[in-house]
Image: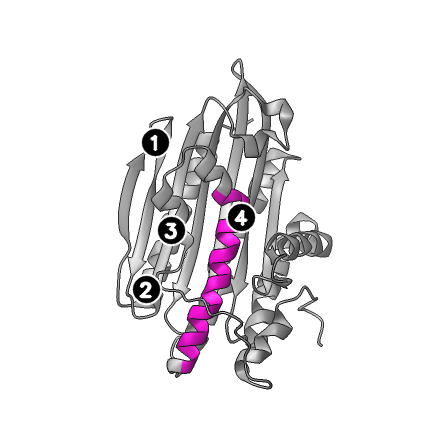
Amino acid sequence: MPSIDTVRDYLTGLQDRICTAIELADGGARFVEDAWTRAEGGGGRTRILREGAVFEQAGIGFSDVSGTQLPPSATAARPELAGASWRAVGVSLVFHPRNPYLPTTHANVRHFRAMRDGETVAWWFGGGFDLTPFYPFDEDVLHWHRVARSLCEPFGGQARYEAHKRWCDEYFFLRHRNETRGVGGLFFDDLHGDFETDFGYLRAVGDGFLAAYLPIVQRRKDTPWGERERQFQLYRRGRYVEFNLVLDRGTLFGLQSGGRTESILMSLPPLVRWEYGYAPDAGSDEARLAGYLRARDWLVPQ
């Protein structure tokens, strides 16, 4: 099996490429890097762009962390890994645009290995990307899912797309709200068939993110908006916070494994609001969002 450093090298390059592309798309701010080390093993580099022309906050982090014991949240599902040492490498990003008509987005690609007595006892790849609009456009959603479908083509085609789209819909679902976090995308975990094939799929997802997102940025970044749209954006950001703090397994693993709190929570929006019992006016653009917060086949005309 190839060294985990091969995956590490790809991920650091991916972080560099995405940062360069987002700085160019924003045109008003640059990423600031915060390099860090972890006492238990490893470290990473967290990059944050703040108060840009397009992005109110954009965070993308690379981490390469290791330990001698997995947290309870990991071994509860995989008891055979209790007592094994481990190493995990990954890139994770969340971009919070300034314009309410431009969706928030998240992407993550990662690789995990567990070792015992110098031998690999488990390994897998995981990742995906998803889109969270506040004022959705069918054109954008269709483009997003067409890109997702196209990058799945060499790895099982329609069957792979349908399986990982469904996984995304199920994972990014706020059960306490009975709604999806957005319009989905792809999500996969515990992918451990053939290393080279699975690593190829990870790279396709990582490399495909910009092709999925940047055209939407170009279409929506200059859309006029006002205080009404801003307040709705801040309210809906609250759902993002609820998911990340209540349901996200990556957040739980990071915190329970002694991860760096600032880097783990960089996904949270810089500004957000809650409102008790909020309900949008019937027939309004804000009310229209509810129709998009359910799993459906976006590639079939409705």
Mark 4 against mark 2, which lies toward the viewer?
Answer: 4
Above or below, 146 against 281 in this view is above
Residue 80, image x and y in percent?
64, 23
Residue 46, image x and y in percent?
33, 46
Image mark for residue 24: 2
For disc 1, the neighbor class at 10 Å (few under 14, some 14 to 19, many from 20) is some
Please, what secondary structure does the residue beneath circle 2 have? helix
Which callout, 4 or 1, points at the residue further toward the start of the chain? 1
Q: Quadrant of residue 28?
A: bottom left
Query: Is 163 placed left or right of 141 in the picture?
Result: right
Image mark for residue 266: 3
Bounds of the magenta segment = 228-251
Q: CA distance from mark 4 to mark 2?
A: 30 Å
Residue under the image location 63 percent in, 39 percent down: 191
Residue under the image location 48 percent in, 71 percent down: 216
User: What type is the residue that disc 2 sits on?
Assistant: Leu
Mark 2 against mark 3, which lies toward the viewer?
Answer: 3
The answer to which of 191 and 66 lies nearer the viewer is 66
User: What type is the residue that disc 1 sits on?
Assistant: Arg
Residue that numbered label 1 is attached to: 38
Residue that numbered label 4 is attached to: 248
Residue 229, image x and y in percent?
43, 79
Mark 2 against mark 1, which lies toward the viewer?
Answer: 1
Image mark for residue 62: none
Where is the N terminus found, in terms of image quarters? top right
The answer to which of 129 and 228 lies nearer the viewer is 228
Q: Main secondary structure of the magenta part?
A: helix
**Cβ–Cβ under 8 Å for marks 2 and 3:** no
Which callout, 3 or 4, points at the residue further toward the start of the chain? 4
User: What type is the residue that disc 4 sits on?
Assistant: Asp
Residue under the image location 71 percent in, 57 percent down: 158
Q: Residue furthest top?
A: 117
